[in-house]
């Protein structure tokens, strides 16, 4: 069983920032990532609100920079490694992976992030990957000169609608209210885009198809109007996120929505277990806040490890 100082589960902005701070302090730091490092930001077309990059950069570029910086200071990144369990082992924590590896960590930082919510409407599951998507950056180029719709009204939905307008001939933005929730400057750019058509006070109630691909969506009204059917070939859903909390459910306290409860410094209800990023109950879920919380969690984890090794 490999002994490490700080195990970090997840290599998104929170996990990579934590890895940077922990490894700079010369703690033996291992980051376990079930997919590719970078987290959700690698599926983001453009980031313009991260300090230090006034002209913006792609999510993939920012993720690559964060990864390289953490590795530069000695953090070990293990991509495509799924952690199956975290369990107390004396005063330490045993980390088991799907590859049969066992690691013993003095402290753990959970930064597993979150995944996009699903609507749960007829046709969604049937046409996933065949016209239904949660990643415009991944799939947008497939819809050149086609009509698509985007569901949602926050920053992610509006930004992805604008990204899709680079390819699609028409983008229907479907929102259940009569005004968007997105940041005002993002809304302004959306309203100026003549390829985007707003479908106000509507919810997507059904995704239709021909058995192979999406062909249309049914929209119900939230204001008493009749249903309408829009012919579309792609459906992109951005209605919020669900925390990836499976590793935490029997280990730490969660709130009513399943997010890990943390204090201001990233401590959980279990001594030695810290958390950061979108999996926590922190309110603002942005790259900058995930990175900041990752740094705080690492700082506290380092103190925890130091006190175990050299108790006062």
Image (tube, helix red, strand yellow):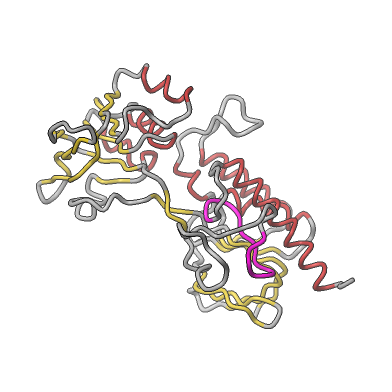
Could you tell me which residue is drawn at 80 percent across and 73 percent down?
308
Could you tell me which residue is drawn at 12 percent across and 33 percent down?
226
Image quadrant holding the C terminus, namely: bottom right
In this rendering, position of residue 87 left or right of residue 220: right
Q: Is residue 179 above or below residue 21?
A: above
Image quadrant holding the N terminus, namely: bottom right
Per the picture, the main secondary structure of the magenta-coloured stretch is loop
In this rendering, position of residue 229 left or right of residue 8: left
Q: Is residue 63 above or below residue 306?
A: above
Q: Is residue 153 above or below residue 282?
A: above
Write down the region rendered in magenta.
267-279
Image coordinates for residue 305, horizontal then vertical, percent: 77, 68
Q: Quadrant of residue 94?
A: bottom right
Q: Quadrant of residue 310?
A: bottom right
Which of the pair 186/57 is nearer the observer? 186
Image coordinates for residue 17, horizontal then vertical, percent: 66, 50
Which of the pair 267/112 is nearer the observer? 267
Which of the pair 285/136 is nearer the observer? 285
Could you tell me which residue is drawn at 13 percent across and 46 percent down?
209
Could you tell me which residue is drawn at 46 percent across and 56 percent down?
243
Image coordinates for residue 247, horizontal then vertical, percent: 51, 68
Q: Residue furthest front?
A: 224
Image coordinates for residue 106, horizontal then vertical, percent: 71, 72
């Amino acid at each position: 069983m490999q002994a490490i100082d700080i195990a970090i589960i997840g290599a998104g902005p929170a996990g990579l920032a934590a890895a940077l701070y922990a490894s700079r302090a010369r703690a033996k730091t291992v980051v376990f990532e079930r997919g590719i490092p970078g987290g959700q930001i690698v599926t983001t077309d453009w980031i313009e609100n991260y300090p230090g990059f006034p002209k913006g950069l792609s999510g993939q570029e920012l993720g690559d920079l964060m990864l390289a910086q953490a590795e530069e200071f000695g953090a070990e990144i293990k991509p495509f490694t799924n952690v199956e369990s975290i369990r107390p082992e004396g005063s330490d924590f045993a980390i088991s992976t799907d590859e049969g590896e066992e690691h013993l960590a003095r402290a753990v930082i959970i930064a597993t992030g979150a995944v996009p919510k699903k609507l749960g409407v007829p046709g969604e599951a049937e046409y996933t990957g065949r016209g239904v998507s949660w990643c415009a950056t991944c799939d947008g180029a497939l819809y050149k000169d086609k009509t698509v719709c985007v569901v949602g009204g926050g920053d992610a939905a509006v930004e992805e609608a604008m990204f899709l307008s680079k390819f699609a001939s028409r983008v229907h933005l479907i929102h259940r209210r009569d005004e968007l929730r997105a940041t005002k400057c993002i809304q302004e750019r959306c309203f100026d885009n003549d390829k985007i058509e707003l479908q106000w006070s509507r919810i997507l109630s059904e995704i239709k198809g021909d058995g192979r691909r999406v062909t249309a969506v049914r929209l119900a009204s939230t204001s008493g109007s009749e249903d309408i059917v829009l012919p579309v070939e792609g459906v992109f859903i951005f209605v919020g996120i669900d925390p990836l909390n499976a590793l935490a459910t029997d280990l730490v306290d969660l709130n009513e929505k399943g997010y890990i409860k943390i204090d201001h410094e990233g401590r959980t209800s279990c001594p030695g277990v810290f958390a950061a990023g979108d999996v926590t109950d922190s309110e603002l879920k942005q790259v900058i806040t995930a990175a900041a919380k990752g740094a705080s969690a690492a700082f506290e984890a380092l103190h925890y490890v130091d006190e175990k090794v050299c108790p006062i």
